Amino acid sequence: MQAIDIAPTFIKHAREAGGGITYQVASGTDLPFSAHSFDFATAFMSMMDMPDHRLVLSEVYRVLRPNGFLQFSILHPCLCPPTRRNIRDMDGTTIAVHVADYFKTSDGRIEEWHFGDAPAGEKAVTAPFRVPRFHRTLSSWLNLLIGTGFVIEEIGEPMADETTASEFPAVQDTRVVPLFLHVRVRKQASERQRVETKAGNELKTR
Ligand SMILES: C[S@@+](CC[C@H](N)C(=O)[O-])C[C@H]1O[C@@H](n2cnc3c(N)ncnc32)[C@H](O)[C@@H]1O
């Protein structure tokens, strides 16, 4: 298992955590791996932070073996565009979500925030996260995936269950509208490769 992140701090902490994974500092837009070398790839909440989505997807496509898949999560392009605000009732429960600026694709606008659940004392003494946003519409994402040659296999829009939402109120809004989009896409094997794999499997079962 190989893992990359562009931030040396993330890689330092990941290496300390171990887990039998080889970590290195690298960019998703220039993967340090040879072509056709992975059965699957995953990108967790990172691709929407990269400036060139076309390049990331073509790099992943390059390193996957035929029939390999990519599974990733991003901020939901429809429900977390540049503007998203929770509308709450008197008890602070989110009852609706205001979204706007869907068509304002952003190229590196810096967003600053603290995790909602971080203790107040911590928020007072730590600098906020500074994250560049590269918002794209849903059709841009889907057309990029299709244009790269991927076949869309499954889409997910996760929500917190009731118990989790009451234990962690910061995620309660995902029960109103989703915050994340999960996508699994596959690099299709050529017709010839599919026939060869089928023949190989039949031989093995004889
Ligand atoms: C929202 S954080 C998620 C981090 C981690 N995947 C997690 O789930 O906790 C986004 C991550 O994307 C990384 N990132 C941004 N641009 C990148 C790029 N071009 N190549 C690789 N990683 C990148 C950032 O350094 C950051 O660690």
Image: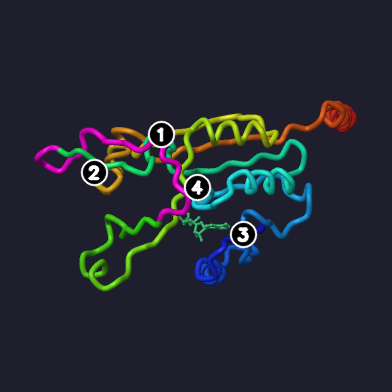
Of the residues shown, which amino acid type is indicated by label 1?
Cys
Distance of mark 3 from mark 1, alpha carbons? 26 Å
Of the residues shown, which amino acid type is indicated by label 4?
Met
Say which residue appears at 46% left-offset and 54% top-offset: 108
The residue labelled by disc 3 is 27
The residue labelled by disc 1 is 78
Q: Which of pointers 1 and 2 lies earlier in the amino acid sequence?
A: 1
| Quadrant of the rendered image containing residue 26 | bottom right
Residue 162 to residue 43: above or below: above
The residue labelled by disc 4 is 48
Q: Is residue 159 left or right of residue 196?
A: left
Q: Which of pointers 4 and 1 lies earlier in the amino acid sequence?
A: 4
The residue labelled by disc 2 is 166
> Residue 18 location in percent, x, y?
57, 67
The answer to whether the residue labelled 1 contacts the one labelled 2, judged by CB atoms less than 8 Å apart, is no
Nearer the observer: mark 1 or 2; the answer is: 1
Judged by its main secondary structure, the magenta piece is loop
Q: Is residue 94 magenta?
A: yes
Secondary element under disc 2, as helix, strand or loop, is helix
Nearer the observer: mark 2 or 4; the answer is: 4
How crowded pointer 4 is (Cα within 10 Å; few <14, some 14-19, many 20+) is rated as: many
